[in-house]
Image: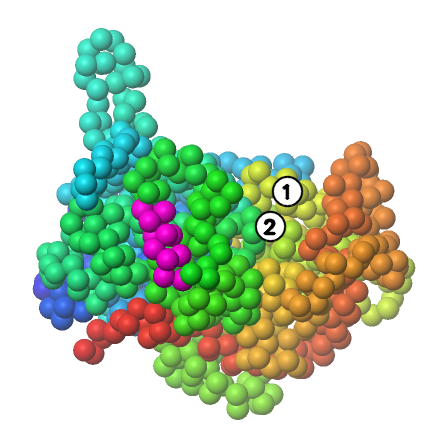
């Protein structure tokens, strides 16, 4: 291995020889690219070494198949993990460049919708930190999640073009291409079955190295891009049909053109199914090629290959693997099935019925005619072995991807303790009865490198100064802060960190959004996708009720509060978009009220993404995790806030339950019905009306909205929302309102006592170590993959 020059030398060399600039003429982007290349060179060494190690040891490899990887910006990740922060900052300062501005110049890779995609990104980083040989497989979308702006308070979506700016991280692999077929017919001659697709595209690989802590290991994120097999139709060109000549390429590229902007409904769209098969087919070919080169004997596959299905999106991997092993490689069907099950495992991320994938069987059969036959055979085999089985993978003229994934997997996991229990008792109750050892829990986690060390350097320094730096890859060490939490002087420093972070955020909001806030207010933050189950409308109702109450009695000693929101709504989810508009409309009225101005401000920041989260999380005082119990599978934002010292106001839902257990009930503001109570309350006739009758504050807030107080030119604008809340109120906003109000007033009282509040916040930090994604990945390695770490091996 060649010895690399100093970081300074590397940067200047890249500036000159990769970008043809000298420091005098380099623009910000040149600097950002040169720094990125210098960092990438260092990552590349770790990466190639890790690959050699994996081959040399013959270790088992983990493959994480996911339609989403919400990786965000990568430069800071690389700099932080290679411990180059001070050096990079100094080099840039020497040339008069601002470190933060250089980092912020990088496009934010939004190849995911929300929690599921961000989880996949945290997992990749933890897999590298732990030295577990792994690949992420996904799609290289040309357009990630849309950009959001507000026009008159309404969400407007604009395309996102992250690839238009240069970025440094991917290595194109033109030599790694696989054909992916669709449609056509199946030819059966006795035991020999062949699928002849009607249409074929090529998947081309692009590799991004993902480096772990201290650069000890790096794994690969391999993203597939659609290409035409014969990109250019010369015949059509020669006949003057210039547009037609380029058509094959345009069509093939469509497959990796855009990310579907929804994580909570199943779209049933043909293109989406094509994307799912495109990813899965290319990934499996790649996995088998690598396996064949190294091991050959297909019966060893489960010993050497673990394939994790991130939700049902890549569930077609089950029948596809059986097809390759049985139809193409000639293994008996039962053996093919057993081998596939030995490799595959499946993570369920939601119990929402509208999000459980089910494909129309005629569409599915048309696109994947051999796979639907195999699914029926898998289903029949499973039914024959389990005679009491009632359900099927094929019901209501649909193919049920959850059922398929469960049957094809040797382990199925939920993402929090509560969610896993509910999986057993609801969606998968029958399959759980038949396979009682299959479902396991792996509570989600977040990487502390990005979500503390990177995004909150002040807190990270205080922690390192107090207990040393071992916490960075051993987050349980945070409990060693417990004696500090009892120490008033230390707590003052802890409080000062939060205060400085809030000042930074306040300045940034003033500069970029014209929102002026006092950093001494309580920063109350709800940032996540918009969804009725997440109940942003409960939050804005309480805000409106509070506003009315302050107006009634401005001198009552209110705790000044900033209500901050951010999040995108799926473009076709009109109710969620109305909630955004309502929050913006209410913000305009409330923020203009001189009576309440000292005590209440509301802001909805546009275009929520990973980078904005990194800005908001360190500055939050209070974390809003207020979903209807039983609906949020886990949540991961909740963990980021707790770790960064923002206590939660929340329901007993998802991982909130475990957060409360870890940080202590006295450091968590609990409210609302339990999942069980929710299920009962839904059956109570007129539950919403009863709740409204019983609470005049709720009554008044709803009246203000319905009577057009926030939309005077268009008083009926929010009748959809008020009608829903006063009527079916499926997510029980009204029923939980009164208790939410009570919890928020407890928050007010607690925050008014600053030292008490700092102590609560610090307990949250000190006891959040369990929510590291390193812990989660260790759990998958031990309980699901049977994979080993190669660091130190
Ligand atoms: N929307 C869950 O809703 C969970 C993540 C990651 C979600 C959320 O509670 O934390 O997955 N589910 O496990 C899906 O995307 C289907 C999410 O992000």
Query: Where residue 779 sits: x, y (%)?
Result: 38, 74
Residue 47 higher or lower than 483, as above or below: above
Q: Specify the quadrant of the image occupied by residue 542.
A: bottom right
Look at the image and say whether residue 381 sits in the magenta stretch.
yes
Left or right for 288, reference 113: left
Can see residue 651? no
Query: Where residue 154 sits: x, y (%)?
Result: 64, 39
Indicate the secondary structure of the residue bearing disc 2.
Answer: loop
* Contact? badges 1 and 2 (CB < 8 Å): yes
Between 741 and 517, the one nearer to me in the picture: 741
| Residue identifier under label 1 | 577
Can see residue 768? yes
Q: Residue at x 34, y 65 (%)?
A: 410
Q: Specify the quadrant of the image occupied by residue 655.
A: bottom right
* Quadrant of the frame with the N terminus: bottom left
Q: Tell me where the magenta segment starts and ends, as one range.
A: 374-386
Q: Which residue is drawn at 38% across and 79% down?
A: 474
Between 574 and 429, the one nearer to me in the picture: 429
Q: Specify the quadrant of the image occupied by residue 521.
A: bottom right
Residue 775 higher or lower than 630, as above or below: below
Query: Where residue 675 sits: x, y (%)?
Result: 65, 66
| Residue identifier under label 2 | 530
Q: Which of marks 1 and 2 is nearer the N terminus?
A: 2
């Amino acid at each position: 291995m060649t010895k690399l020059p100093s970081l300074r030398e590397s940067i200047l060399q890249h500036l000159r020889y990769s970008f043809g600039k000298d420091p005098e003429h380099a623009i910000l982007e040149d600097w950002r690219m040169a720094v990125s290349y210098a960092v990438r060179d260092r990552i590349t060494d770790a990466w190639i070494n890790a690959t050699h190690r994996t081959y040399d040891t013959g270790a088992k490899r983990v493959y994480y198949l996911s339609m989403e990887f919400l990786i965000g910006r990568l430069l800071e990740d690389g700099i932080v993990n290679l411990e180059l922060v001070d050096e990079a900052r100094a080099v840039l300062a020497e040339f008069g460049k601002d470190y933060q501005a250089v980092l912020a110049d990088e496009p934010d890779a939004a190849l995911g919708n929300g929690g599921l995609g961000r989880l996949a990104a945290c997992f990749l980083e933890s897999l590298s930190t732990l030295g577990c040989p792994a690949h992420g497989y996904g799609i290289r979308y040309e357009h990630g999640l849309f950009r959001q702006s507000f026009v008159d308070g309404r969400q407007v979506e604009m395309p996102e073009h992250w690839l238009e700016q240069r970025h440094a991280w991917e290595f194109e692999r033109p030599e790694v291409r696989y054909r992916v077929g669709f449609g056509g017919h199946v030819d059966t001659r006795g035991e020999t079955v062949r699928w002849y697709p009607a249409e074929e595209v090529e998947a081309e690989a692009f590799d991004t190295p993902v480096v772990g802590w201290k650069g000890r290991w790096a794994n690969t994120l391999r993203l597939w891009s659609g290409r035409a097999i014969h990109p250019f139709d010369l015949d059509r060109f020669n006949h003057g049909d210039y547009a037609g000549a380029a058509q094959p390429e345009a069509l093939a590229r469509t497959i990796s053109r855009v990310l579907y902007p929804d994580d909570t409904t199943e779209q049933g769209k043909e293109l989406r199914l094509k994307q799912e098969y495109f990813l899965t087919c290319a990934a499996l070919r790649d996995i088998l090629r690598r396996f064949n080169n190294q091991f050959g004997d297909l019966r060893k596959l489960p010993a050497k290959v673990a394939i994790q299905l991130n939700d049902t999106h890549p569930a077609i991997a089950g029948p596809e693997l059986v097809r390759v092993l049985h139809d193409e490689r000639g293994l008996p069907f039962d053996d093919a099935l057993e081998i596939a099950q030995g490799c595959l495992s499946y993570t369920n991320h939601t119990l929402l019925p509208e999000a459980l994938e089910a494909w129309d069987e005629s569409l599915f059969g048309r696109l994947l005619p051999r796979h639907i036959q195999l699914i029926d055979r898998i289903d029949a085999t499973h039914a024959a072995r389990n005679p009491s089985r009632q359900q099927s993978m094929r019901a209501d003229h649909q193919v049920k991807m959850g059922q398929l994934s469960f049957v094809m997997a040797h382990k199925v996991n939920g993402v929090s303790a509560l969610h896993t229990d509910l999986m057993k008792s609801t969606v998968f109750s029958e399959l759980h009865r038949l396979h009682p050892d299959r479902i396991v829990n792996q509570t989600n986690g977040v990487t502390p490198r990005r979500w503390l060390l990177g995004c909150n350097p002040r807190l990270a320094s205080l922690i390192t100064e107090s207990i040393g730096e071992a916490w960075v890859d051993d987050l349980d060490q945070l409990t060693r802060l417990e004696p500090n939490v009892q120490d008033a002087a230390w707590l003052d420093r802890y409080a000062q960190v939060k205060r400085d972070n809030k000042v930074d955020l306040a300045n940034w909001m003033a500069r970029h959004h014209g929102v002026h806030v006092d950093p001494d207010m309580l920063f109350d933050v709800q940032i996540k996708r918009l969804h009725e189950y997440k109940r942003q409308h409960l939050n804005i109702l309480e805000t409106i009720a509070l506003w009315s109450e302050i107006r009634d009695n401005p001198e009552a000693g209110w705790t000044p509060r900033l209500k901050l929101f951010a999040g995108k709504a799926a473009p076709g989810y009109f109710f969620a978009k109305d909630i955004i508009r309502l929050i913006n409309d209410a913000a305009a009225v409330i923020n203009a009220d001189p009576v309440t101005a000292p005590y209440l401000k509301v802001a909805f920041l546009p275009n929520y993404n990973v980078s904005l989260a990194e800005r908001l999380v360190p500055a939050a005082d209070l974390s809003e995790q207020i979903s209807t119990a039983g609906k949020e599978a886990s949540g991961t934002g909740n963990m980021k806030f707790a770790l960064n010292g923002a206590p939660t106001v929340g329901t007993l839902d998802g991982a909130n339950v475990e957060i409360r257990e870890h940080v202590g009930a006295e450091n968590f503001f609990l409210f609302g019905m339990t999942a069980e109570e929710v299920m009962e309350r839904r059956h109570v006739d007129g539950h919403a009306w009863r709740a409204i009758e019983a609470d005049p504050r709720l009554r008044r807030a709803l009246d203000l909205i319905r009577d057009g107080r926030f939309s005077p030119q268009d008083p009926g604008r929010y009748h959809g929302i008020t009608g829903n809340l006063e009527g079916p109120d499926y997510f029980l906003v009204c029923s939980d309102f009164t208790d939410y109000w009570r919890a928020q007033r407890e928050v007010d009282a607690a925050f008014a006592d600053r030292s008490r509040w700092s102590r609560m916040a610090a307990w949250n930090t000190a006891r959040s170590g369990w929510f590291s994604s390193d812990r989660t990945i260790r759990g998958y390695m031990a309980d699901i993959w049977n994979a080993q770490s190669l660091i130190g091996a």
